[in-house]
Image (cartoon, rainbow, N blue to C red):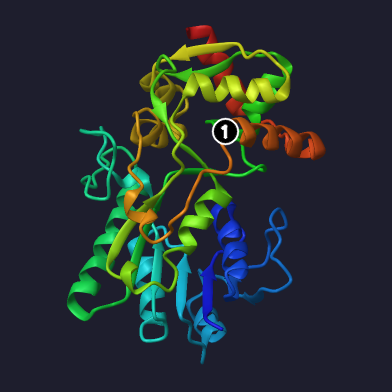
Amino acid sequence: MPRILYLGGTGTISSACVRQSLAAGWDVAVLNRGRNQLRPLPDAVEPIHADLADDAGLAAALAGRSFDAVADFCSFTPDRLRRNVDLLRGRTGQYIFISSASAYQKPVAQLPITESTPLSNPYWQYSRDKIAGEDLLTQLYRDEGFPMTIVRPSHTYDECMVPVEGDTTVLARLLAGKPVVVHGDGTSLWVLTYNTDFAYQFQGLVGRPQAIGQAFHITGDEVLTWNGIVAELGRALGVEPVIVHVASETIARVIPDRGPSLLGDKAHSVMFDNAKVRTLAPGFAQQVPFAEGARRIAAWHRAHPAAVTVDASLDAAFDTLVAMA
């Protein structure tokens, strides 16, 4: 039975990929700190508990182990990625680095985005670090044949996650009838991908020689507007949203920690050509359009009301933006 190691494995995307790998007949090990109770590991998974910030502890946890594939969901800087690669070099047949579709050129010069679209994001350090990680792996592949594969998710969600800026604070505002801030005029194009739809396509790359040395983005096919996303959430919750449009630059000024991800990603229209990944994951048909995803979000949060938390400072900033509009 082929064996895969997930670095991570309990996040929004990786948890679905773990389940998909099990369904595909892989022996699955997951390395993390074992603290995420929101998305618990299936019983069939081998848990390996280690802190990825502890070099010695990580080396000890992986001592003597080898894998047919490694899926790295936890490298957010090139230094961390290099440490992980050095540790696993010669011990895996494939190293899958989870990058980000936010690494693509911003503003986007041409749609749809393909894997050959340039990588450049002057707004968001997170994206630049992912680009640096890709550059590192590409050089290792060219120099020594390191068996890397790069995967670029776009905005991927599940029932536990509200895929708008503000997460459950926005959900609470919708339920309370308070205005919801939407950047720009709300008509820019966006793509949301449910995590199980991502996982099906991801598994098509795992253990495939044709994926070595290659980069793939993975998204759904449905193209939405931000007005439409908020309207669909409201419909699922049984409320009529009150949308207030605010310039992206103004939002970034009032809520600085939200600025990079907005100006470097969500403020730009995107759509993706997924033909490349579908050559290795044939037969894909999007199973969860956002209308269904929104219903799942609403149902999960109704069943877990304690999860509908409000960030008081963020909520106040939204009120400020509404007053400025």
Q: Residues within 10 Å of mark 1 (few under 14, many from 20)?
A: many
| 315 vs 132: above or below | above
Mark 1 lies on a secondary structure that is helix
Q: How many marks?
A: 1
Q: Is residue 315 left or right of residue 267?
A: right
Is 300 situated above or below 12?
Answer: above
Residue 32 in view here: no
Depth check: give the residue in front, 192 or 127: 192
Residue under pointer 1: 290
* Rendered position, 95 above or below 193: below
Residue 241 lies, with reference to residue 3, above or below; the image says above
Where residue 74 appears, x then y in whole percent?
A: 48, 62
Which residue is most to the front?
A: 283
Image quadrant in which the N terminus is located: bottom right
**Which amino acid type is shown beneath numbered disc 1?**
Phe
Please tell me which residue lies in front, 177 or 273. 273
Residue 251: percent from left, percent from top: 44, 22
Q: Position of residue 84 (x, y in %)?
A: 41, 74
Q: Nearer the viewer, residue 54 or 84?
A: 84
Residue 14, percent across and down? 55, 59
Q: Residue 29 appears in which quarter of the rendering?
A: bottom right
